[in-house]
Amino acid sequence: MKLIFAGTPDFSVGVLEALHQAGHDIVGVYTQPDRPKGRGRVLTACPVKEKALELSLQVFQPESLRDTDTQKQLASLDAEVMVVVAYGQILPVEVLQTPKYGCLNIHASLLPRWRGAAPIQRAIISGDKQTGIGIMQMNKGLDTGDILLEKICGITDTDSAQTLHDKLAILGAQGIVEALDNIDQLTPTIQDEAGITYAKKLSKEEAWIDWSQSAVEINQQIRAFNPYPIAQANAVSNKFDNKVLRILSASVIDLAYGAKPGEVIEYSKGLCVVATTDGALSLKTVQLAGKKPLSIKDFNNAYQLTQVF
């Protein structure tokens, strides 16, 4: 098919590659303008732009799609469909109605659960056992369009936001290729209003661990916030006092120790167990602010934690 692709982050790159490999005629790639990045604030292209240029595709980077001239330029590409994957801009009705088959979005949840900005993280932190991707016919609402195709993905007890992201990116690429191959045979399904939940954007304030929660709840937070914004707590050690400790991975120990939440109850070279209100957490990978991530064994060789709070 003759199509326009719109996307920005890593999640979108595999989809763009899959569409290109499937032989679709990608007449234009829309992505966010280059942004300053890093300590030097160097103007940097996003992952989708880099991949599009590598594939010798025409790239467009408008600040907004609401501009009349921008809309005319998009219409002049005469695409049959526009595929949108984590683009980062709201598409006005004029754009939604331009291609013959409209605009199709790949959303990283089983809608209507987890509409919004952070569906992967919210699924993990809420303890969901499964999620998936949906190919949605876009309308003017926020993730409210009819579902054309879905693919289900289980969430394991060890999945982080990064590992689940990678699984869903693969499913999304497979799903959109399948949807385009069968575009005239797909039956739109209206979303069930009774199942709506919203996945609000992550904030750094949410990263602070509350040790009065259960070990399961805290571990879900740790997994959901890896790689961003990383779950963290203030820590006390024999070599420092009240430093920020980021926790990248841990495992749940389903035992009642009778210790106060946040107290380190077991410590050895390869083990650091912290009490919670219900059960305990065995820390696996940690990082002091400003330092590199370390296995708990390497961390314990340098420090001995006594409490986190």
Image (cartoon, helix red, strand yellow):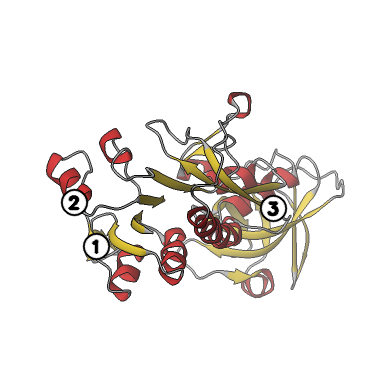
Comparing 1 with 240, the one in front is: 1
Q: Nearer the viewer, mark 3 or mark 1?
A: 1
Name the quarter where the N terminus is drawn: bottom left
Which residue corresponds to the image point at 57% horizontal and 35% vertical from the top-left?
189
Instruction: Answer yes or no: is residue 208 visible.
Output: no
Q: Is residue 63 left or right of residue 11?
A: left
The residue where tag 1 is placed is 59
The residue under label 1 is which amino acid type?
Answer: Val
Chain-order first, disc 3 or disc 1: 1
Comparing 103 with 90, the one in front is: 103
Secondary structure type for disc 3: loop
The residue where tag 3 is placed is 155
Q: Is residue 121 left or right of residue 276?
A: left
Count residues near mark 1 (Cα–Cα under 10 Å), then give few for <14, some for 14-19, many for 20+: some
Depicted 280 relative to depicted 295: above or below: above
Q: Do callouts 2 and 3 mark residues in contact (Cβ within 8 Å)? A: no
Q: Residue furthest top?
A: 194
The residue under label 2 is which amino acid type?
Answer: Ser
Chain-order first, disc 2 or disc 3: 2
The residue where tag 2 is placed is 76
Which residue corresponds to the image point at 87% horizontal and 46% vertical from the top-left?
256
Instruction: Answer yes or no: is residue 26 visible.
Output: yes
Comparing 267 with 154, the one in front is: 154
The residue under label 3 is which amino acid type?
Answer: Ile
* C-alpha distance separating marks 2 and 1: 14 Å
Q: Residue furthest front?
A: 184
* C-alpha distance separating marks 2 and 3: 42 Å
Rendered location of residue 236, percent (x, y): 61, 55
Q: Nearer the viewer, mark 2 or mark 1?
A: 2
